[in-house]
Amino acid sequence: MKALVTGASGFAGRHLVAHLTEAGDSVIACDRAGVDAVDIVDRDAVHQAFARFQPEVVYHLAALTHVGDSWNEPQAVLRVNVEGTLNVLDAAQAAGVRRVLVVGSAEEYGRAGTEYPLREDAPLLPNSPYAATKVAASYLALQAYLGAGLETVRVRAFNHTGPGQTDRFLIPALARRIAEAERDGHDHITVGSLDPVRDINDVRDIVRAYRLAVLEGEPGAVYNVCSGAGHSVGEIAAALLARARVRLRLVQDPNLVRPVDVPSLIGDASRLRAATKWQPAFTLEATLVAVLDEARANAAR
């Protein structure tokens, strides 16, 4: 299968390219830089790339993904995540692409209520610019199917981490602070709010689900990609500290607390499992160990 991946040099994109290649697919890795550089906000460039490469399927991962940053640059997030998605969908239709996977986020649910785990029919109540753009991108994908017949499949990926994630995100940031404290002899690490609860997944499981959704998912449908288990930031921090090589304590830093945050995001992946038989292969413990090992290797350089 000839697959084009947008956002291929991003965290999940790199893992997806590796997984697709291992599965025997022919992969075109597209991003803003590199050999096949394509900026998704450049409509003409996207159309030209799709016409040149003629992919059978497209995995659309390119996006600005940091929730906190979206408050500072809402216009940039809107342009990349919404206008960029529209460009990808239009180009896919023009090039005769068979199927497009549009990657969304659990953040689309926002403050959806207190009934967990969240199913795909839960209300969408986004409470950040990032979340609002992912809702808009999802509905553009649905419209492309209903209005133009382009086979789009949508996924809402819950929080994921693993090797290669930047330390601008929670778990790699905590792992980096632990590795540096071990190296420098500190007795504490900083953390923001300990209360938010998240459904944490390994990125390697997430990208497997993406390929299965393309192969087995229903056009127009949306699928949660998640474990169904919730863990608070405090629990995650404690699990990482338990693996530290020195005794450390947590110190809360008000500067690390988001002004607006979703208290809990836990998903139900029953629809995805029914369609694809997908199951997570990595335990949370194994994922945390992998992230911490990588942080230690980086701290030792």
Image (cartoon, helix red, strand yellow):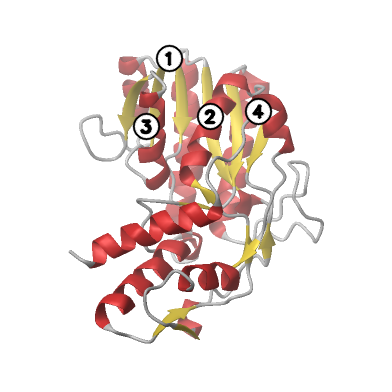
Question: Circle 1 is placed at which residue position?
Answer: 1
Lower sequence index among marks 3 and 1 = 1
Q: Nearer the viewer, residue 290 or 204?
A: 290
Question: Circle 3 is placed at which residue position?
Answer: 17
**Which residue type carries mark 4?**
Lys
Q: Is residue 32 above or below residue 5?
A: below
Q: Residue at x 32, y 38 (%)?
A: 39
Badge 1 crowding class, 10 Å Cα cut-off, few under 14, some 14 to 19, many 20 or more, is: few
Q: Residue at x 44, y 69 (%)?
A: 243
State the CA–CA distance, disc 2 to disc 1. Answer: 14 Å
On the image, the x and y values in percent for residue 202 come to 50, 47
Does the rendering let one see residue 198?
A: yes
**Which residue type carries mark 2?**
Leu
- Indicate which disc residue 101 carries: 2
Question: Circle 4 is placed at which residue position?
Answer: 277
State the CA–CA distance, disc 3 to disc 1. Answer: 13 Å
State the CA–CA distance, disc 2 to disc 4. Answer: 18 Å
Marks 2 and 4: which is nearer the front?
4
Q: Is residue 39 above or below residue 229?
A: above
State the CA–CA distance, disc 3 to disc 2. Answer: 14 Å
Q: Name the element at disc 4.
A: loop
Q: Name the element at disc 1.
A: loop
Q: Residue at x 59, y 49 (%)?
A: 158
